[in-house]
């Protein structure tokens, strides 16, 4: 059954996108609560099939919510949106290297009018469910970006694309971990249940205090680090596989859609 956003939710989403389009750039965790957020990866048409296949073979870190065809910049998940301007920060990649970060990707888009874009589910979507259950989100409390880490866990390759999984981490009180697993597990389209609980070394993460993306976490006594597959994984694949050009969101800066989180509950 399709779940429709309320008028208030739609107003929140549209106001958030308008502010971002006007130049407001902050991490979007906790923004437009109750509405789905999405990661972005845009690649030249020559790389589009392999990107789709990579996502299909790695659905946990790369759950595809929408494919936007070449020449199109409006998401069906957010009518009236422009994916070139409605994300707070973008990363421009050239030959697998991060060339620049910008708040407006229109000029970069014009370099490759054949770009095909993929919106990937984001774990910010299930955070509202955790908060409603009384499980605090530390990076929201501290006004920080969520910490994200490159792991040693390989993704299934697809043609020229390969790389390791990226994970996000949230410290959870030990007696609430089972609840967090159950709540997030109800949203498989936005990464679902955690991929790991506890010792980060088994993921190849050697120092929790030094995330590869986002801000350093604060893990308090009685808390356990809980790791979810992350939609920044395609960026790790870009770094490993070196396509000639790509545009992505900057980690933590998502596209806010008009689709309620409840649409993806199972």
Image (cartoon, rainbow, N blue to C red):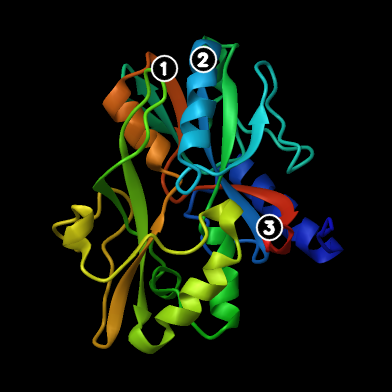
Relative to residue 203, is residue 86 depicted above or below?
A: above
* Residue at mark 3: 264
Mark 3 and mark 2: Cα distance apart in space: 29 Å
The residue tagged 1 is 245
Q: Inspect this view and state whether residue 103 appears.
A: no
Q: Is residue 248 left or right of residue 174?
A: right
Asked if the residue at tag 1 contacts the one at tag 2, i.e. Cβ–Cβ closer than 8 Å, the answer is: yes
Q: Nearer the viewer, residue 128 or 226?
A: 226
Residue 138 location (% of width, % of height)? 39, 74
Q: Earlier in the sequence, mark 3 or mark 2?
A: 2
The CA span between labels 2 and 1 is: 7 Å
Secondary structure found at label 2: loop
Of tags 3 and 1, which is closer to the observer? Answer: 3
Q: Give the percent coordinates (x, y) of residue 161.
A: 37, 24
Within-10-Å neighbours for mark 1: few <14, some 14–19, many 20+: many
Quarter of the image for residue 196 reads bottom left
Q: Quadrant of the N terminus?
A: bottom right
Q: Eyeballing the image, is 266 above or below 175?
A: above
Q: Nearer the viewer, residue 68 or 217?
A: 68
Pointers 3 and 2 in contact (CB under 8 A)?
Answer: no
- Badge 2 or badge 1: first in the primary sequence: 2
Q: Position of residue 13 (x, y in %)?
A: 71, 54
Instruction: Name the residue carrying label 2.
Output: 44
Quadrant (top left, top right, bottom left, bottom right) of the C terminus: bottom right
Tell me what residue is drawn at x 66 percent, y 53 percent: 16
The structure residue drawn at horizontal position 47% and vertical position 35%, both measured from the top left corner, is 57
């Amino acid at each position: 059954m399709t779940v429709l956003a309320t008028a208030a939710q739609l107003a929140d989403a549209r106001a958030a996108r308008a502010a971002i389009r006007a130049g407001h750039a902050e991490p979007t965790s906790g923004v437009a609560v109750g509405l789905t957020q999405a990661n972005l990866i845009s690649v030249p048409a020559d790389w589009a099939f392999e990107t789709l296949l990579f996502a299909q073979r790695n659905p946990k870190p790369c759950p595809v919510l929408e494919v936007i065809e070449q020449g199109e910049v409006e998401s069906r998940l957010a009518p009236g949106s422009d994916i070139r301007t409605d994300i707070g920060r973008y990363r421009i990649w050239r030959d697998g290297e991060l060339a620049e970060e910008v708040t407006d990707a229109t000029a970069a888009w014009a370099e490759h009018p054949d770009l095909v874009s993929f919106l990937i589910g984001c774990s910010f979507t299930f955070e509202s469910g955790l908060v409603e259950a009384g499980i605090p989100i530390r990076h929201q409390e501290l006004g920080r970006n969520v910490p994200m880490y490159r792991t040693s866990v390989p993704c299934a390759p697809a043609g020229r694309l390969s790389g390791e999984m990226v994970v996000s981490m949230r410290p959870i009180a030990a007696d609430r971990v089972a609840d967090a697993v159950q709540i997030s597990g109800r949203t498989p389209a936005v990464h679902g249940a955690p991929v790991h609980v506890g010792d980060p070394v088994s993921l190849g993460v050697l120092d929790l205090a030094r995330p590869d993306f986002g801000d350093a976490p604060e893990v308090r006594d009685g808390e356990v680090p809980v790791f979810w597959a992350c939609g920044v994984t395609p960026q790790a694949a870009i770094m490993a596989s070196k396509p000639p050009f790509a545009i992505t969101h900057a980690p933590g800066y998502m596209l806010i859609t008009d689709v309620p989180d409840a649409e993806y509950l199972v």
